[in-house]
Image: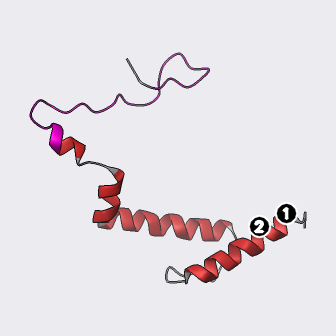
Amino acid sequence: MPEVVPLGLSASPYPDRTVAKPGFEKDLAKRTLTNLYNLRPAWLAAAHAQLDAAVAAAYGWANYTADMPDDELLRRLLALNLQLSSGA
């Protein structure tokens, strides 16, 4: 039986939880998001770069670069937040 059935649905659209084959429990226990991010495989870094660029484009930041300092990103986000909260 699925673990999660969203309200309004009679069946879960999600796959069932992966259950380790006997003898492989420790291997499966190592497969965590933290470990995945610590390894930072190339496909994950590329996916994040694409997502970052798409978000920057959605915010209208035509001059966004991947090496933009966090302080600049935070400055821009604060300015956008203040603009939206003022109703402008």
SS at mark 2 in the image: helix
Residue 52 part of the magenta segment: no
- Asked whether, in this view, residue 78 is left or right of residue 85, the answer is left
Q: Which element type, helix, strand or loop, lies under badge 1?
A: helix
Query: Is the stretch drawn in magenta largely helix, strand or loop?
Result: loop
**For mark 2, does the 10 Å Cα neighbourhood hold few (<14), some (14 to 19), or many (20 or more) residues?**
few
User: Answer yes or no: do the residues labelled 2 and 1 have beta carbons within 8 Å?
Assistant: yes
Image-based side of 5 in relation to 63, left or right: left
Which quadrant of the view contains residue 23?
top left
Instruction: Tell me residue 53's x, y (percent).
Output: 55, 70
The answer for how far apart the CA atoms under marks 2 and 1 are is 6 Å
Q: Is residue 50 left or right of residue 44?
A: right
The residue beneath circle 2 is 81
Quadrant position of residue 61: bottom right
| Residue drawn at (38%, 67%) of the image | 45
Q: Position of residue 5 (x, y in %)?
A: 50, 23
- Camera-side residue: 26 or 67? 26
Circle 1 packing at 10 Å, graded few (<14), some (14-19), many (20+), is: few
| Residue wearing tag 1 | 85
Q: Where in the figure is residue 42, as x and y percent of width and height?
A: 31, 67
Image coordinates for residue 58, horizontal then vertical, percent: 66, 65
- Relative to residue 14, is residue 47 depicted above or below? below
The amino acid type, in three-letter code, at marker 1 is Ser
60, above or below 71, in the image:
above
> The C terminus appears in which quarter of the rendering?
bottom right
Tell me which residue sits at (14%, 31%) in the image: 21
Q: Is residue 60 visible?
A: no
Asked if the stretch drawn in magenta spans residue 24, the answer is: yes
Instruction: Tell me which segment is drawn in magenta.
Output: 4-26
- Looking at the rendered structure, the number of numbered marks drawn on it comes to 2
